[in-house]
């Protein structure tokens, strides 16, 4: 499934905003203002919008471009170039690899793990789930249901148990069976509460005490929260060594441009994109597909 087919809303929104732009007879200030507005509307954010447009404008002037459509082509190329040197691969180098999922409440951590488990199992890899959200019994139940759908083992502890020990147990279980991957759920936490953020450090430390290696710490962000997501990301990166972002709910958002802002302002690649609530609705982020989806 391609992002293009799934990205109805953001696509419509960004191209809709380009409607006026496309009817401009020449490349003048109005064209640059239209573009800026369209990019900001797609949540690219001011710093990234400014630097993108500065470069595109330089190129347009150098080539004496007169057709607004040609300006779009330059912008498109510049956006793709933006991801050129970015490593988007999920790191599978551990034995087992442990991937931690972190983020604020309700962003889609547990659901993403469910979808990703399906993806990984389908690709022939073996997966163990760690129910590291020990805050609520319902959280364990939710993860267990996802686990059952892909027929993988879910390791859990008692309600209120130390999440580190649950994840440790899951890693031990995975190591003893030669599993490839441990996907570890964690409780949603407010990025401003320092005790909860400290807990993440401990989780990571303990997860590596045995045979496993934490090769990914994936910050899950809800695309519909827009620039607020960027704030969350800033604070999570200060505590946890975030290696990638999962951008969820892009199906219900006109704000796909946040991908560019996260990469540019925080240097963190978006590696996975959630585009719905069902098990198939997870896409590996792919730059050209993403840029095509924005422009088409
Ligand atoms: N439309 C849409 N909904 C999603 C997506 N990902 C998750 N959701 C929904 O978002 C809601 C919250 O998802 P969860 O996976 O429970 O979120 P969480 O981060 O684990 O939440 P807490 O454990 O409470 O912190 C659920 O209703 C999901 O179905 C997505 O990509 N698109
Ligand atoms: Mg959850």
Image (cartoon, rainbow, N blue to C red):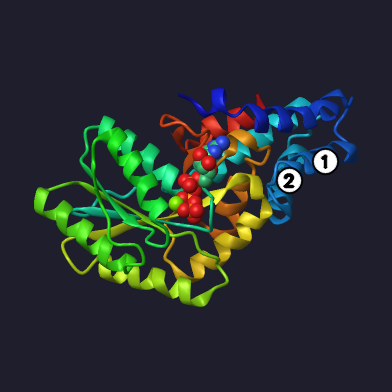
Picture coordinates of residue 173, whole percent (x, y): 15, 54
Q: Residues within 10 Å of mark 1 (few under 14, many from 20)?
A: some
Label pair 2/1, CB-CB below 8 angstroms? yes
From the viewer's perspective, is residue 88 above or below residue 291?
below
Separation of disc 2 and disc 1 at Cα? 8 Å
Give the residue pinned by disc 1: 32
Residue 284 vs residue 130, the one in the foreground: 130
16 with respect to 144 (left or right)? right
Q: Residue 294 vs residue 200: left or right?
A: right
Residue shown at the point (62%, 62%) measured from the top left: 231
Residue under pointer 2:
53
Q: Quadrant of residue 27?
A: top right
89 up-or-down from 239: above or below: above
Q: Is residue 110 shown left or right of residue 104?
A: left
- Would you say 278 lies left or right of 25 here? left
- Quadrant assignment, res 24: top right
Label of residue 142 in the image: none
Q: Helix, strand or loop at disc 1? A: helix
As helix, strand or loop, the secondary structure at mark 2 comes to: helix
> Could you say where residue 255 lies in the image, as x and y percent from the top left?
66, 41
Residue 235 percent across, percent down from the top left:
55, 67
Residue at 81% in and 42% down: 37
């Amino acid at each position: 499934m391609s992002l293009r087919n799934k990205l109805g809303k953001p696509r419509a929104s960004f191209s809709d905003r380009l409607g006026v732009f496309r009817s401009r007879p020449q490349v003048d200030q109005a064209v640059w203002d239209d573009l800026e507005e369209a990019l900001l509307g797609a949540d690219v954010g001011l710093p990234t919008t400014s630097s993108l447009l500065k470069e595109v404008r330089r190129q347009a002037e150098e080539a004496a471009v007169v057709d607004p459509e040609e300006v779009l082509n330059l912008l498109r190329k510049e956006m793709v170039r933006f991801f050129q040197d970015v490593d988007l691969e999920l790191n599978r180098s551990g034995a087992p690899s442990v991937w931690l999922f972190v983020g604020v409440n309700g962003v889609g951590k547990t659901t993403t793990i469910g979808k990703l488990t399906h993806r990984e199992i389908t690709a022939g890899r073996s997966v163990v789930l760690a129910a590291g959200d020990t805050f609520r019994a319902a959280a364990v139940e939710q993860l267990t249901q996802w686990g059952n759908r892909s027929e993988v083992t879910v390791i859990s502890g008692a309600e209120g148990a130390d999440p580190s020990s649950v994840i440790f147990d899951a890693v031990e279980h995975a190591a003893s069976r030669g599993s490839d991957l441990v996907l570890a759920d964690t409780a949603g936490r407010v990025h401003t509460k320092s005790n909860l953020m400290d807990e993440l450090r401990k989780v990571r430390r303990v997860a590596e005490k045995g045979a496993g290696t934490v090769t990914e710490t994936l910050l899950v962000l809800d695309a519909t929260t827009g620039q607020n997501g960027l704030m969350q990301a800033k604070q999570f990166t200060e505590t946890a060594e975030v290696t990638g972002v999962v951008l969820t709910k892009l199906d219900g958002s006109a704000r796909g441009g946040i991908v560019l802002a996260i990469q540019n302002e925080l240097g963190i690649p978006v590696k996975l994109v959630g585009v719905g609530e069902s098990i198939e609705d997870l896409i590996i982020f792919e730059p050209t597909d993403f840029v095509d989806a924005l422009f088409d």
